[in-house]
Amino acid sequence: MAVAVEGLLRELAPQVLGTLVRRYEQFDMCEDAVQEALLDASVQWPRDGVPDNPRGWLVTVAARRVVDHVRSEHARRRREESVAVSVAADELLAPAPGEERSGDRDDTLTLLFLCCHPALSVTSQLALTLRAVGGLTTAQIAGAFLVPEATMGQRISRAKQRIKATGAEFRMPPEAERDERLRVVLHVLYLIFNEGYTATSGPELHRAELTGEAIRLTRAVLRLLPGDGEIMGLLALMLLTEARRPARTDAGGRLIPLAEQDRGLWDRRLVAEGVELVTKALSSTAVGPYQLQAAIAAVHDEAPTAEETDWPQILALYGVLAGIEDNPVVRLNQAVATAMVHGPRAGLGVLDELAGDERMAGHHRLAAVRAHLLEMDGDAKGAVAAYREAARLTTSLPEQRYLEERATRLS
């Protein structure tokens, strides 16, 4: 019961926060009120049962907290008056727990757009999204990104202050800006997933709480915009990638590359859902980068063995993707596909072109791919040097151990 309640509260938290921010336009105060309501629910619901309308119950309790706070702060009388005139009078008289006004709506997407405001840095967008929409505590977010809790708390606080300073209103952006802002939202969710799937630093390869939140939030966005092909593509990409997670490490946490994974451990339920989503997206909407990445992931996941992977199809898809996005990571992966189709020297030629891109300067993945292709080409000495360079550049301990093991094996 407690586990089910926790999942329900996490799902409802952004909806309730969005409703309150829309009504009262005070992000910090509304978030505090929602946290208090969630705490009350986490105690009462396992004991007394989940109310018939759990979202309405939370909105009601949290709204009362906001009103009580405003009324008790005599030094902030102007704020109370502002709130009173900004909403209908009957909204200050909250309904009984379990009742919900017909005008209430799901503001999750609006809240996501607010957390991904272009005035914020990417790191602030990530942190605020996980806090306000994902429902993670400041301590959980700090732990995921390996920074002190106080540091993360300051980052989130500054993000809220920055949004307030911009005068941003709690509403969807104008239609002319919506597509661009949606790309920011999807990019933030994509980054959250990537950080969870391959942590950039620290002793663990995976951070399951981040991949789980990214998938959950992307599902929520898709429910709100069910016909958007890129949202479908992003969710499919996440599912197809997450499906491999059980096989990515051994019992000791050692990284296992894709070609060596036990495909019997892959989550076929996630694979099937991802393939269905990307197929629907590609057949019904304009092609976008997330759909193409998902299509590539689907080719990998549908291959019974590594040897049966359709590399020519993957190379063709990377060619289309490279034409849409000028992204060095795409070209890095394209080099691998080129090597698998045309031989390692052809792949190394693509890497030589990429080496001059400043965006890849000092990136361990460039050295790691070079090492892999040199190993394929029989240049053990060159591969050892490249593996060791990649190990030196990465801040992920599992990746570092894997790269050093490859270098030792070839020495």
Image (cartoon, grey):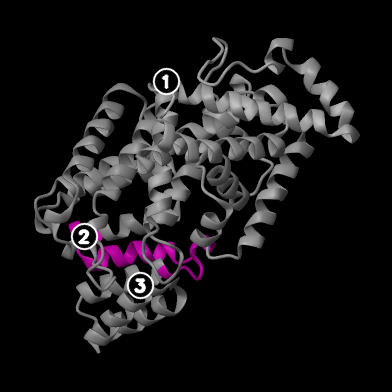
Q: CA distance from mark 3 to mark 1?
A: 46 Å
Is 144 rendered above or below residue 212? below
Pick whichever, 200 or 41, lies toward us: 41
Q: Quadrant of residue 216?
A: top left
Q: CA distance from mark 3 to mark 2?
A: 14 Å
SS state under label 3: helix
How packed mark 1 is, by other alpha carbons closer than 10 Å (few <14, some 14-19, many 20 or more), is: few
Q: CA distance from mark 1 to mark 2?
A: 41 Å
Left or right of 56 in this view: 380: left
Pick whichever, 399 or 145, lies toward us: 145
At 60% from the left and 45% from the top, the residue drawn is 128
Reading the chain from its start, which is encountered first: label 1 or label 2?
1
Q: Which residue is mark 2?
A: 247
Question: Residue 252, percent across and down?
Answer: 26, 73
Tell me where the magenta segment starts and ends, as one range: 337-364
Reading the chain from its start, which is encountered first: label 3 or label 1?
1
